[in-house]
Each structure stands twice: as C-alpha cells, then as structure tokens.
Image (spheres, helix red, strand yellow):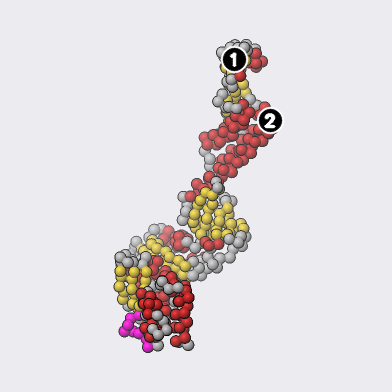
Amino acid sequence: MDSGILIESFAEFANSKNIDRPTMISVLEEVFRTMIRKKYGTDDNFDVIINPESGDLEMWRTREIVDDNSEDIWDYNKIPLAEARKIQGDFEVGEEVAEEVKLIEFGRRLVQTARQTLIQKIKDMEKEIMFEKYKDQVGEMITGEVYQTLRHEVIIVDPEGNELSLPRNEQISKDRFRKGESVKSVIHKVEMNNGSPKITLSRTSPVFLERLFEVEIPEIYDGIISVRRVVREPGERAKVAVESYDDRIDPVGACVGMKGSRIHSIVRELGNENIDVINYTDNLELLISRALSPAKVSSMQIDRDAKRVSVFLKPDQVSLAIGKGGQNIKLAGKLVGMEIDVFRDVEEQNDEDVDLTEFSDEIDEWIISELHKIGLDTAKSVLALNRDELVRRTDLEEATVEEVLEILRKEFE
C-alpha cells in the first residue's frame, strides 16, 4: 500500500475536523513508529519524517559502525563494518550509517495492521471530538433530523451527521416523529460509555421551554426580559416567570403577544402545552398569588422555615387553584419552592358542600385529620383532587384514598 494514500486520507479527515498540524503529525508518527517497533523491537534509533500535505513519508535508521568481530554487532544500534560497506564502500569503524527504510520492507501484513490502526485512531478521535464539542453545550437547543425511530428512543442526526439519542422518557407524550422530519430539542446529558460518547436530548426539560422563549421572544434574546423560573408538566401545562429590566415593557404582554401571537408557535411545538406566563417578583406573597393564576387568592399564611403556605380562597376559586388533576397547585408550588395548602374561606362556605367532619361515622378521625393538614376541609375540596395527587400530598395508602373518594362521591349522587 502507498503510504501517501494513508497519510493523505488522514490529513483530509484532520483538516475537516480542524485538528491542528502538530497533533496530526504526532498521530501519524505514532502509527508508523508502532510498525517499526513490531519489526525491529525498538524505534529508538529511527527518525520518522512526515509531510501531511504531500503525503511523503521517510523513515531513517541510524546505526554505529563496529568491527566485524566486535561483541556489539547484535545491538540494535550497531552495524558490522562489512555490512556498512555494502551501503557505501568507504565507511570506517566508529562512523554512523543513516539508512532509509522503505515501507515495502515491512511486508503486507504489517502495513495492513498500520492501516487498521490509523482507521481506529480516526474513529477514536471522532468520538473525542464529538464529546468535546457537546460537553460544553449542555442546555443548548439543537435542531436535527430524525434518522430512525426505535421503541425506546428516536435517533436524531445533527448537521454534521453525528447520531444523538432522544429517549422515550424525554419526549412529550404527544410527540410523533417520522424519518427525515426536523426536530428541536435541548442537549440534556453528555456521557462517555465504553469509550463512545452518548449525547442525550430532551423535549421535556424546563430548559427546553426556556430556550424556545429565547428564540421566539426578541426581548428575551436581547436581554431586556429575563426568564427567571420554568416549571412543567410536559405536554400538559407549564408556568414561566419572567422579569423585565425596562419599566416601559410589560414582560407578560411581550411574551404572549397580541392575541397570543408570540407564544402560539411555542405552544404548538410543545403539543399544545398550556403555558401560564407570570410576572416575576421578589415579593413572595405576590409571587404565590400570581403562581396560582387563574385563581384569585383571598389571603395566605406563609411558614418560611417549613417552606409551606396556607392559601385561603372563595369556594368558586378552589377548583381553579387546584387545577385538573392537581396540576395548577403542583406547578405553583414548584415555581415558588413551597408546599401550598388550599383552604376555603369559612365565611364563604357553600351550603351545597359538606364539611369532612360530617363523615366521621364513615371515615376515621385520623384520616380526616390528614386531609385537614393539606387544606382539605370539605367533601368537594377532596373530590377536586385525583387519587394520585392525594396519595402524594398525604401519608394515606392508595386503598384508603380510594375508599374515602367513594364515600364522598356517594354523598353527591
């Protein structure tokens, strides 16, 4: 095999990946020195000269001339006088012989091994380059093309042809992808697994929603408006707290746009995810009130040490505060970093509702007490939450919660 082809193919790869010249030469030299060591046992007395641009390769072996009867003639860096004079007739003992070694002298097998080594080094460098490229881009948005849809993941190809993984659990439930389709996502994780880079993408991360806001809202891109916090139930509902650094600009209005024109493309990208945009404030009480939107809060009691807040609302606002399946109150709690308990204003109690204490003959007192702890003091306030949410927020078992819900439902049948 012609060494020029070997060198030029590597140089072409190195140039395409912006590998600097010293690194390129170092890799090539190591491949040929490995070949020398396999044939001669050492490369200490060899010089390897490579020109990546022209594909030229020179390998020179340097040895000291010793007398034919010397005990040193078998040393790797010594050559008998008789052998040296076959190269040049006027050599004398003590002089050095620099002899060029041609690639053909290594034999087909060694040259083939060198080729395979170089190919492997190219693959290893490609992996390292890919890892280095992406490890500093975690949290950045990327647009790729669907290459393959598998059961547990979708393989996305970036503009350079690298394969990235979008796992099922990082996809929005409504996502449906076809081969060749363009997909936006955020770089979620970058890892090395058994020497190969694993780039994991996400469409469910709050960071993805934040990046979409940066792309779609010019004021955010320009730094006039800042996204302070993002919480999501991917594909269902999200809350985004934004803040303006210019008093003349309403951050919520700027993000939503006239009749929702600006946020519409984001909602569509996220499978019609319902997005509440909230004006951020350092006033915790006001932030909690805004986070529970669209419900209107009458009053609240904040326990900062316990990170818990008791919110009091009129009866017709309770279901709005809790939201479908408890989504609204759960996201509001995440946004403000506190557990939110909802209570009805006692003065506004609706006669159609029934106080939980009225069920003490059917429901144990300790169970009623557990429900009171999270602000549920009437039958309808309990029924406004689903089983999973009640289990999550109390210490009650699933079976117990199901039994309580059944008892309360019968009251209104």
- Point 34% across, 62% down: residue: 246
Of 214 and 24, nearer the camera is 24
- The residue that mark 2 highlights is 107
- Point 57% across, 27% down: residue: 43
- The residue that mark 1 highlights is 71
Q: Residues within 10 Å of mark 2 (few under 14, many from 20)?
A: few
Asked if the residue under mark 1 is in contact with the one under mark 2, i.e. CB atoms within 8 Å, the reply is no
Where residue 366 sits in the image (x, y, percent)? 38, 77
Question: What secondary structure is found at the residue carrying circle 2?
Answer: helix
Of 261 and 369, nearer the camera is 369
Work out how far the residue at label 2 is from the one at label 1, CA to CA, in angstroms: 30 Å
Furthest-right residue in view?
Answer: 108
- Left or right of 19 on screen, residue 224: left
Inspect the image, locate mark 1, and give the three-letter code of the amino acid beneath it: Glu
What residue range appears in magenta?
A: 344-351
- Point 57% across, 56% down: residue: 156
Residue 135 appears anywhere in the view: yes
- Left or right of 71 on screen, residue 1: right
Where residue 74 sits in the image (x, y, percent)? 61, 19
Quadrant where the N terminus is found in the figure: top right
Where residue 36 sits in the image (x, y, percent)? 61, 29
Q: Is residue 374 magenta?
A: no
Residue 268 appears anywhere in the view: no
Q: Is residue 348 magenta?
A: yes
Q: Is residue 252 above or below residue 137?
A: below
- Res. 339 mark: none
Q: Tag count in the figure? A: 2
